[in-house]
Image (tube, helix red, strand yellow):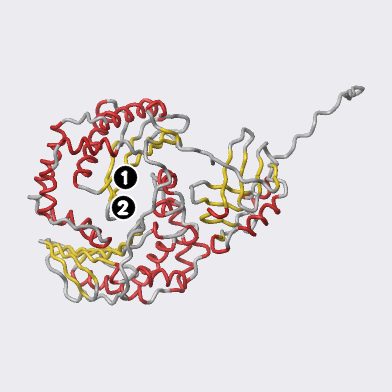
């Protein structure tokens, strides 16, 4: 049995279950709320909140995600209540003296952490905005100050912007958390940079990844399970290409969910696996879905309603929906939605969803033969240059204008970032500048590698608004690139002179 309560503005979901008590305090703030210049502030705040709690005899931790931040614990009712009360006390009184130390710990953590698998797909779809921000490194750590972190806390870590889930025999006594009051913060919806359609880009080796977005529905979750099962059957069991093959469904906001898929393969089999996966997605898009496959998934899900842990498995999703302001389905509504799904519903949804895919294929491969359009690797235009700075290493050049900057390659390829469309400028003490455009294009300038490099840097610094500048930590001298040494001309033969004219 589950039941909602409210104490001091904090919404509490209690799900009855025998055994230890587990609690999760979820705030509606995450990496997608940050700007590039703040990147890492939510994770830093999570670390600062947890520091005063120290080591505990029971399991407890925190986690920063794209749209939510969690503090959770499992133990006796008293242990869980103490943990939650200590979290609330730490939120009110952050240990500011730990700012530098926690920044260092976050850098260490980042150095050991594998990059997010879907980061390139996210950057191409959104650029440095919304969910796309979460795909960038924690670039803002070096310049974050305690007042900035405290403002972030005051804005997001409030009772009205949180939901507490408690799973255990009873709702523990003393769940009166001294959290500050505030406002609910909805998830900002960001429009994608790519037009609707099937797109691809080439990067990495071995695996194929894809993402699509769909209106949240019970039918969509059935479709995702069906696609995942088909991928596993075809790519692992039948063809023997993949160790991992499948996809998942994750709500993004009140109306939209992401479908993310992945299949791996040995490098020498990647092309064959990619072709079979593309064919499979096309077959599903064309409606080649067996009635029995849909009916089996629906039937299996309906039997889950009889399981004693069913409400526990739904608790996290129910709390998330209540937190973000989405429609919260009752168990009866969820069951009715499942029972109403037909194979034709899933076929119709597959035709819609699988016609709007972004696919990452291994470097050196392409799927334009299957009707996918390649994501542009270069800008469509360049600035009207006031002057040009030539590269010291190759035939490329920087076109410098008061409105922006363009890199132009020897074959006419170009990358442009207009200052008016700049999301951030990363600035190193040695002069390196990296401009991040809102359209997802990035342009880096190493002053040591271009003629008049210091003048280019001065032009950038004069044009970029100060609030967009992100100060980066100094690089070691060995990390600053230098132009390739010019080769000396071959020695002339004695008695030989080159003729003029």
Q: Residues within 10 Å of mark 1 (few under 14, many from 20)?
A: many
Residue nearest the observer in this picture, 327 or 362 = 327
Q: Quadrant of residue 344?
A: top left
Q: Earlier in the sequence, mark 1 or mark 2?
A: 1
- What residue is shown with label 1? 213
How many numbered marks, from 0 up?
2
The location of residue 93, given as percent across then percent down, is 38, 77
Direction front: furthest residue: 384
- What residue is shown with label 2? 252
Residue nearest the observer in this picture, 276 or 492 = 276
Query: Going 52% across and 62% down the picture, which residue do you hit?
Result: 142
Q: Quadrant of residue 98?
A: bottom left
Up/down of 28 relative to 199, above or below: below
Q: Are marks 1 and 2 in contact (CB under 8 Å)?
A: yes
User: On residue 273, which mark appears?
Assistant: none
Q: Quadrant of the C terminus?
A: top right
Query: Going 25% across and 61% down the picture, which residue do you hit?
Result: 325
Up/down of 181 relative to 494, above or below: below
Residue nearest the observer in this picture, 14 or 404 = 404
Up/down of 464 relative to 162, above or below: above
Label 1 secondary element: strand
Query: Going 26% across and 35% down the picture, which residue do you hit?
Result: 351
Q: Quadrant of residue 399?
A: top right
Say left or right for 16 vs 234: left
Q: CA distance from mark 1 to mark 2?
A: 9 Å
Say left or right for 448 vs 333: right
């Amino acid at each position: 049995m589950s039941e909602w309560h409210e104490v001091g503005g904090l919404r509490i979901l209690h799900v009855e279950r025998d055994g230890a008590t587990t609690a999760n305090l979820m705030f509606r703030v995450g990496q997608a709320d940050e700007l590039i210049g703040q990147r890492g502030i939510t994770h830093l705040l999570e670390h600062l909140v947890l520091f005063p709690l120290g080591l505990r005899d029971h399991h407890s931790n925190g986690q920063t995600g794209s749209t939510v931040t969690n503090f959770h614990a499992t133990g006796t009712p008293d242990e869980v209540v103490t943990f939650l009360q200590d979290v609330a006390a730490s939120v009110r009184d952050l240990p500011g003296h730990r700012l530098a130390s926690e920044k260092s710990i976050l850098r260490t953590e980042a150095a050991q952490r594998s990059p997010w698998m879907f980061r390139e797909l996210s950057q191409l779809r959104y650029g440095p905005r919304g969910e796309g921000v979460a795909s960038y490194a924690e670039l803002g750590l070096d310049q974050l100050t305690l007042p900035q972190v405290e403002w972030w806390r005051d804005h997001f870590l409030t009772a009205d912007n949180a939901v507490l889930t408690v799973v255990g025999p009873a709702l523990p006594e003393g769940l009166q958390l001294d959290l500050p009051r505030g406002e609910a913060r909805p998830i900002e919806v960001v429009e994608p940079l790519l037009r609707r359609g099937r797109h691809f880009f080439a990067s990495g080796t071995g695996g194929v990844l894809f993402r699509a977005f769909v209106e949240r529905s019970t039918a969509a979750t059935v479709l995702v399970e069906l696609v995942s099962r088909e991928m596993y059957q075809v790519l692992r069991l039948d063809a023997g290409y993949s160790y991992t093959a499948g996809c998942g469904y994750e709500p993004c906001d009140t109306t939209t969910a992401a479908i993310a898929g992945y299949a791996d393969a040995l490098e020498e089999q990647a092309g064959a696996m990619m072709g079979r996966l593309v064919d499979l997605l096309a077959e599903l898009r064309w409606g080649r879905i067996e009635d029995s496959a849909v009916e089996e998934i629906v039937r299996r899900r309906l039997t889950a309603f009889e399981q004693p842990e069913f409400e526990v498995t739904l608790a996290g999703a129910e709390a998330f929906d209540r937190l973000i302001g989405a429609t919260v389905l009752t168990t009866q509504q969820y069951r009715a939605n499942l029972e109403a799904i037909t194979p034709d519903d899933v076929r119709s949804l597959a035709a819609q969803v699988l016609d709007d895919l972004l696919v990452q294929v291994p470097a050196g491969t392409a799927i334009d033969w299957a009707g996918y359009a390649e994501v542009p690797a270069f800008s469509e235009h360049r600035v009207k240059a006031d002057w040009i700075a030539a590269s010291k290493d190759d035939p490329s050049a920087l076109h410098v204008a008061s409105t922006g900057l363009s890199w132009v390659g020897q074959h006419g390829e170009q990358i442009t970032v207009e200052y008016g469309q700049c999301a951030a400028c990363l600035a190193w003490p040695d002069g390196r500048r990296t401009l991040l455009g809102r359209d997802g294009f990035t342009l880096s300038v190493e002053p040591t590698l271009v003629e008049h490099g210091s003048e280019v840097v001065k032009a950038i610094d004069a044009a970029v608004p100060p609030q967009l500048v992100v100060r980066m930590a100094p690089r070691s001298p060995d990390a600053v690139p230098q132009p390739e040494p010019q080769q000396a001309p071959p020695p002339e033969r004695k008695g030989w002179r080159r003729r003029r004219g």
